[in-house]
Amino acid sequence: MKKLIVIAVLIALILNLSAQGVYATSGATETTEQKNALLKAQEYLDWVALPYTGLIDILEYEQFSHEDAVYAADHCQADWNEQAKSRAMFQLNHNSYSYKGMILKLEYEGFTRDQAVYGADNCQADWDEQAVKSAKSLSRYPSFSRADVIEQMEEDGFSPDQVMHGIELIDF
């Protein structure tokens, strides 16, 4: 009789955990470590925009195995394009970027080319305004001449029109 009660309790526990999503995605059993990695992944994504590979790196840093980190990144239901867009918007609040520069920055951070392009296309940036911010920032360097600022902005991916717009608006 004791065995039947224990079995009944275990079955009820498993059914309860399964209903809560602790077990079973696509018929496979989710381990405790996978569940914990998934919860941690969702915490990070609620806090900061990350690329797929960046999320895996952070989870591994948090001492999850590579397999559990990949599982979490695969199952966290993140929209990686939206993550790239959010990351681009964050970057624009802290630095100035050209359209090309933003794509390179997002790729450097681990987003795919397509995700980076999506992020740059959808971050609501005013690229002319970014050129003004860049020109203003660069002109503060005492060693930078007007020609140096122009050269640097062109290297940063601003178009010639954007460069001149930025330079003229700051009266440099």
Image (tube, grey):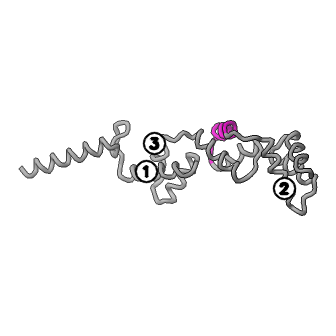
**In this picture, residue 3 sits left or right of residue 73:** left
User: Which residue shows up at 48% across the image and 40% down it?
Assistant: 77
Per the image, the residue denoted by label 1 is 39
The span from disc 2 to disc 1 (Cα, nearest Å) is: 42 Å
Q: Amino acid at mark 1?
A: Leu
Res. 161 image quadrant: top right
Circle nearer the viewer, 2 or 3: 2
**Magenta residues, dominant SS class:** helix
Residue 58 in view: yes
User: Which residue shows up at 45% across the image and 42% down it?
Assistant: 75
Q: Nearer the viewer, residue 65 or 42?
A: 42
Per the image, the residue denoted by label 3 is 75
Residue 113 in view: no
Q: Amino acid at mark 3?
A: His
Is there CB contact under 8 Å for labels 2 and 3?
no
Q: Is residue 116 magenta?
A: yes
- Region rendered in magenta: 110-122
The span from disc 3 to disc 1 (Cα, nearest Å) is: 10 Å
Q: Is residue 155 above or below residue 124?
A: below
Q: Is residue 84 magenta?
A: no
Q: Secondary structure at mark 2?
A: helix
Residue 138: assigned label: 2
Res. 143 image quadrant: bottom right
**In this picture, residue 44 sits left or right of residue 164:** left
Mark 2 or 3, nearer chain start: 3
**In this picture, residue 5 sits left or right of residue 165:** left
